[in-house]
Image: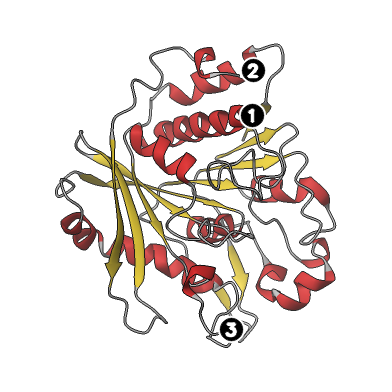
């Protein structure tokens, strides 16, 4: 499915993008101040916002504000302001492994994105030409892999804190829609013994309260054997185990890198496919447009285009 498969008026022409980093947000009590990258179209007003949470992985800088350029650049070139934090789990920070919350800082990650929303005034003032151009009523969250877990918590997923046994509810009502890319699924016996022992916060994942609209993106070859014994179906759990409205994009022959969403030409992408990444760029953009702007036809048109070819890259279902 090439870009030419889509009707020409769905996306419009891309706009030049201004990207500024790091924008430093003072965060007392955090191990280091929160740094973000802000990417925005150089023109336009009342711009919607996407908070983009990075995953982990073998490369250092992909797990930071410097990753996920294929998504951030496309979304920004088509009318979104994309804000990318460097979470405490990033290897670029070289934090002491005994820092509270290590190694993946699941709670801090979600708090980072809440902090971004709290500090939009600071971000607007720090980025040239951005002041007064945000539509704060139209905010979405997206995340890949561990970033998908972070996004799911803000969308309403719950877990039990393994430290004190309390239920954790980090739902963020300012976020109106989300995209979960290769996100973790349910816990319990779906996890490998190593994950259950070393990442116990994943044991109690509960999607029954994840009521915010979301698009779940999963590869049908994403085995993730280091995380789960259930195979590729595990990454679709956030769709099947949560209430609607939700949509599921299943990508054929896609592995955990989903064709290369974490960066351009990165070695850790085991299923590199520019065509697949292009489809994800366009389908995720169209989904968020339709959720944030009721009546927008981009999502339906993009789904029709996905199914129209003789050899589709995936399928979409909704509930």
Residue at the disc numbered 1:
316
Instruction: Work out how far the residue at label 2 is from the one at label 3, CA to CA, in angstroms.
Output: 47 Å
Give the side of residue 65 with respect to residue 278, left or right.
left
Q: Residues within 10 Å of mark 1 (few under 14, many from 20)?
A: some
Residue 307, percent across and down? 64, 17
Q: Residues within 10 Å of mark 2 (few under 14, many from 20)?
A: some
Instruction: Work out how far the residue at label 2 is from the one at label 1, CA to CA, in angstroms.
Output: 9 Å
| Residue located 62% across and 31% down the image | 276
**SS class of the residue under badge 1?**
strand
Give the side of residue 285 with respect to residue 138, left or right.
right
**SS class of the residue under badge 2?**
helix
Residue 97 badge:
3
- Count numbered badges in the picture: 3
Residue at the disc numbered 2:
307
Circles 2 and 1 in contact, beta carbons < 8 Å: yes
**SS class of the residue under badge 3?**
loop
Sequence-first disc among 1 and 3: 3
Instruction: Work out how far the residue at label 1 is from the one at label 3, CA to CA, in angstroms.
Output: 41 Å
* Quadrant where the image shows the C terminus: top right
| Residue located 56% across and 22% down the image | 303
Looking at the picture, tell me which residue is in the foreground, 312 or 263: 263
Residue 306, percent across and down? 60, 20
Vertical order, 54 against 78 (above or below):
below
Sequence-first disc among 2 and 1: 2
Discs 1/3, front: 3
Residue 277, percent across and down? 57, 34
Q: Residues within 10 Å of mark 3 (few under 14, many from 20)?
A: few
| Residue located 79% across and 61% down the image | 226
Sequence-first disc among 2 and 3: 3
Residue 280 badge:
none
């Amino acid at each position: 499915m090439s870009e030419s498969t889509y009707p020409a008026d769905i996306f419009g022409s891309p706009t030049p993008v201004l990207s500024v980093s790091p924008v430093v947000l003072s965060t007392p009590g955090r191990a280091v101040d929160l740094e973000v990258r802000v990417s925005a179209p150089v023109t336009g007003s009342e711009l919607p916002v996407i908070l983009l949470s990075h995953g982990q992985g073998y490369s250092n800088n992909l797990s930071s504000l410097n990753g996920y350029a294929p998504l951030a650049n496309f979304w920004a070139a088509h009318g979104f302001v994309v804000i990318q934090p460097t979470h405490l789990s990033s290897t670029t920070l070289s934090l002491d492994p005994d820092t509270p919350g290590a190694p993946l800082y699941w709670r801090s990650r979600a708090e980072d994105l809440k902090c971004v929303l709290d500090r939009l005034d600071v971000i607007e003032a720090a980025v040239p030409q951005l002041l007064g151009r945000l539509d704060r009523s139209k905010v979405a969250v997206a995340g890949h892999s561990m970033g998908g877990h972070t996004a799911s918590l803000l969308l309403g997923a719950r877990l039990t804190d393994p430290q004190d046994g309390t239920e954790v509810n980090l739902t963020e009502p300012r976020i109106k829609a989300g995209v979960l890319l290769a996100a973790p699924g349910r816990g319990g016996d779906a996890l490998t013994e190593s994950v259950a022992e070393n990442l116990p916060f994943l044991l109690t994942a509960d999607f029954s309260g994840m009521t915010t609209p979301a698009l779940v993106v999963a590869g049908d070859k994403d085995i993730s054997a280091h995380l789960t014994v259930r195979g590729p179906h595990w990454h679709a759990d956030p769709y099947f185990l949560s209430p609607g409205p939700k949509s599921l994009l299943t990508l054929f022959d896609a592995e955990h890198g989903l064709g290369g969403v974490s960066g351009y030409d990165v070695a850790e992408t085991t299923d590199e496919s520019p065509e697949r990444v292009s489809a994800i760029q366009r389908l995720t953009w169209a989904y968020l447009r339709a959720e944030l702007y009721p009546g927008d036809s981009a999502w339906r048109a993009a789904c029709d285009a996905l199914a129209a070819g003789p050899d589709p890259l995936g399928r979409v279902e909704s509930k």
